[in-house]
Amino acid sequence: MTKKRIIGLVVGVIAILFIGGLVVYPQIQNSRYNDAVAKADSLMKSEQYNEALKLYDKALTIKNNEDAKKQINQINKLLKGSKDNFKNGMASFNNGLYKNAYDLFSLVIKDDSKNYKVAAEKMKECIKLNTELALKNSMDFEKAGNYSVAVDSIRTALVIDKDNQQLKDALDKYNRLRGERPQLAEHQKLIDFFAKQGVTIPGNSSEWDCSTTSSPQSFGAPASWGNNPTIFVTQLGKKDGMIVEMGVKYLYCPSINKGAKVITDSNNYSQIEKEYN
């Protein structure tokens, strides 16, 4: 075999290998990329976001692909969202909004390792403190005769402390008290009086709670009413997931046939807005 022929064969082999490499190498790279992305997708589904992030980053070193970039952006959003939920949860906790704080802490993800353990402990504290607050508030509502509000306060606490027997007993108690009072008949007297004054008050609405009292001045009634039995309705609404009084009451005293609209501010100061005769 001549020297020229040998050189020709070597060049041919090199050319074949080079051309083969151009065909095979992209296939190998695609296979590596697909393998990395498949593993990362699996980790995403099992909420192992930090490990998934590493594999998506690795996939991008093999091949620049928008799908991997989108997944990386999604993970970064999840991690940022978790940190924001923890931060907002702490703010709610420090402001005594324990149910709201609990909900936010429950959204902190495991891969947000710096905050996850703290959030788990804070959730336990939220349950305890929210239950204590609900029981205290319900007792205040009971003293005011607002049994429906007391019931809603206890029900809200049971959402995150469902096995608490003290809450269950309180719920039974306030449901019983709410059922025992002659609410419908008394409520109708008030509705009829204010209807004549051009004021419409719903007869069957969860937005109003009806009660009676022998100490009307405790609820903002005019001093001239004395201790005459008085019917009143309180406007209700939701704040931070709890049923609360909205600061508006309508009072009616049947024995003197007079009514009043009372506004209570955030400092619990009541003022007569209007009297009705």
Image: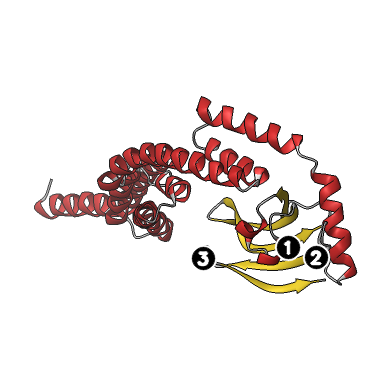
Count neighbours of disc 3 (C-alpha within 10 A) and say few if under 14, some if 14 to 19, many if 20 or more. Answer: few
Which residue is tagged 3? 266
- Alpha carbon of mark 2 to alpha carbon of mark 3: how far? 26 Å
The residue that label 1 is drawn on is: 250
Compare residues 49 and 170 and report the one nearer the observer: 170
Q: Position of residue 51 (x, y in %)?
A: 30, 43
Task: Looking at the image, tell me whether mark 1 or mark 3 is earlier in sequence order.
Answer: 1
Q: How many marks?
A: 3
Marker disc for residue 258: 2
Residue 182, image x and y in percent? Answer: 80, 41
Q: Amino acid at mark 3?
A: Ser
Crowd around label 1: few <14 · some 14–19 · many ≥20 (10 Å): many
Instruction: Give the structural element (helix, strand or loop) at label 3.
Output: loop
Give the residue type at disc 1. Tyr
Residue 207 seen in render:
no
Q: Amino acid at mark 2?
A: Lys
